[in-house]
Image: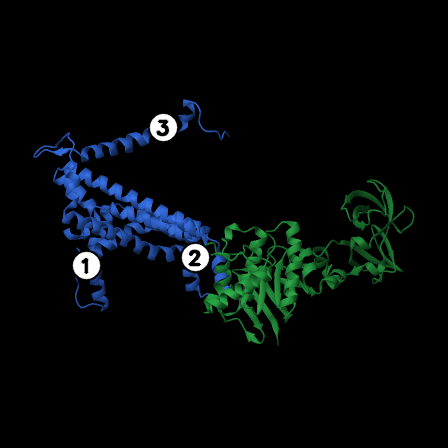
Chain colours: A blue, B green
Amino acid sequence: MRRAAPQKLTDYLPIAFPTLMLGIFFVIPFGLMVMVSFFKRVQGGFYEPSFTLANYARFLSPFFGEMLVFSLCLAALVSICCLCLGVPFTYRLTRQSRRAQVIWLIGLLGVLSLSEVIIGFAWSTLLSRTAGLSNLFVWLGLMDKPVAWTPSFAAVLTGLVYQAFPYTVLVLYPAFSRLDPSLMEAARTLGASPVRGFLNVVLPAMRKTLLATFIIVFIFALGAYLLPQLLGRPQHWTLSVLVTDQAIYQSNMPFAAAMAVFLVFASLVLVAISGQINRRGGGS
Amino acid sequence: MAGLALTDVCKRFGSVSAVDGVSLTVPEGTFVCLLGPSGCGKTTLMRMIAGLEDPTSGEIVLNGERLNDVPAHKRDLGMVFQSLALFPHLSVGENIAYPLAIRGRSKAEIGARVSELLDMVQLPGVTDRSITQLSGGQRQRVAIARALAVSPRLFLLDEPLSALDAKLREAMQVELRQLQQRLGITTIVVTHDQREAMSMSDEIVVMSAGRIQQMAPPIDMYRKPANPFVADFLGQANLLTFRGVQGGADCSAGLISGLDLPLGETRQVSVRPEDVVVGPRDAGSIRATVSFVREMGASVEFHLTAGSERIIASTSPKAHPDCRIGDEVSVTIPAEACVVFDKQEA
């Protein structure tokens, strides 16, 4: 195996195909999108080439500001919920027998095979007044009469957490299964109760994985555009919903493109910030 | 009673018996090695003492207190793990301070104790270092200091030196033994290294297949192994099958005169290599051919073939400088050097 840096043009051959694919399917479309975001919309038509910052200027309105803050907060909340559920779950899972682990993981992968539409409609049925879970609680005597839990913020959150949970576990799983079990045992022999040992030793030892998972789920939730529409009211809509709305229903491609560029930019900034935190935290 | 007492402790994993009826007494202040091949149950036994596994049956009693239902974090034991299990996100000082902080000691007290412990393991001035900046031997010392931080009632070490290179391991064996004697702490070490067990412990417990084979001080065990397994596991042993004849015992190798075996009955006999006397061709009772010569520096091993038996003799390199493969020699095995095993264990 040669370790030297590529010298001739032919040395780049092995990466030519991936580069080509990345170029065709990512760089060019993204470039087009950036381009369109500076174009001018033509009323009743499509758009015409020009250079205007008007599409970006619209972000400065309070409406979009609020929507952006809401989108970021929702994504952060989904990440936090997924970590709070996923970390103890994955930790317990990696302590099970191989067989049990495989069964659980297959189940989780099954959830991944469901489309966002199916998840959305399934939850809107489950949380509805007419056919939902509240009927079951009434039957069990826990509630007086069935209620509608959707559309609501809680329903949006539930749907998103449900959808992101398998990703959370799949990102956490490799790191947790590599975690030396004697770390926890050492904490216990040193006098820490199981809960305390988990908080003092397991979580700090896994902090990089936790941060990485947070970012992945955050970006995943930031991109969700169907579930907020299916399970929430208009005030629960995220920036992604708005992008869809502008692009498809309002035919305002330049503005939709500007919002999409902004969303990508916000995600990148977030990744960069957490990378910095990580580097500083890792050095100490 | 002060010290640790195990009574008929068993541990089953499904249908597998990892520890099978172990009863053991470790008097206070003694250094005991649990020795055996991998899978013999020694680590499981230690984990039960530490509270990391629950025994299927049997009692674990420390200083008169029954430990069975006491959770691991309330047992006040110090344990050093095979992987050391130092917390990677904490500095050296914070690792050692961890058990003290849990017990709510004051900052000043913790600081003083940490530097005292680091002095004790001869590693002063590394309080603020990261674990990753330490060498293997230094990590070992930090793990020992952390386990001893709260002056535990029992000091447990699971294969503590297995990750170190041979030279450092021997130095640490001496150091660990000196430390234990200075503190007078009851210590149990799990090891598969018989030299380690021999050189460190007051008592060795040899285990095999979940059972104790023998418990004795090292030199007694070496001189008087209870069965062929112990003889073979602790140091080298020639295991020969002899039959009692008039005035001695014989086997395919030859005759040992004066060895008292019941007439006509066969027994397994263990002879240490250093007790086998090699002489010129006609000097002894057993004729043998040298099949291999293993130079060890301080000693030399002759692998001998006598009849259908193979005998290993260990001598000073100066004793037979001219002995080569294929040479005919005589072998004398003194009757008093033989350990005769009971028939059922043969």
Q: State the mark number for residue A202.
A: 2
Comparing B114 with B260, the one in front is B114
Tell me how far mark 2 sits from mark 1, CA to CA.
36 Å
Q: Amino acid at mark 2?
A: Val
x then y, percent, for residue B37 = 63, 55
Q: Which residue is label 3 attached to?
A: A17
Q: State the mark number for residue A149.
A: 1
N-terminal label among 1 and 3: 3
The reply to whether the C-beta atoms of the residues labelled 2 and 1 are less than 8 Å apart is no
Q: Can residue B289 be seen by looking at this rendering?
A: yes
Say what secondary structure mark 3 lies in: helix
Question: In the image, is B332 to the left or to the right of B86?
Answer: right
Q: Amino acid at mark 3?
A: Phe
N-terminal label among 2 and 1: 1
Crowding near the residue tagged with mark 2, few <14, some 14–19, many ≥20 C-alpha atoms within 10 Å = many
Crowding near the residue tagged with mark 1, few <14, some 14–19, many ≥20 C-alpha atoms within 10 Å = many
Note whether B32 is above or below A33 in the view shown. Answer: below
N-terminal label among 3 and 2: 3
Q: Amino acid at mark 1?
A: Trp
Residue B5 is drawn in which quadrant? bottom right
x then y, percent, for residue B292 = 78, 42
Comparing B23 with B47, the one in front is B47
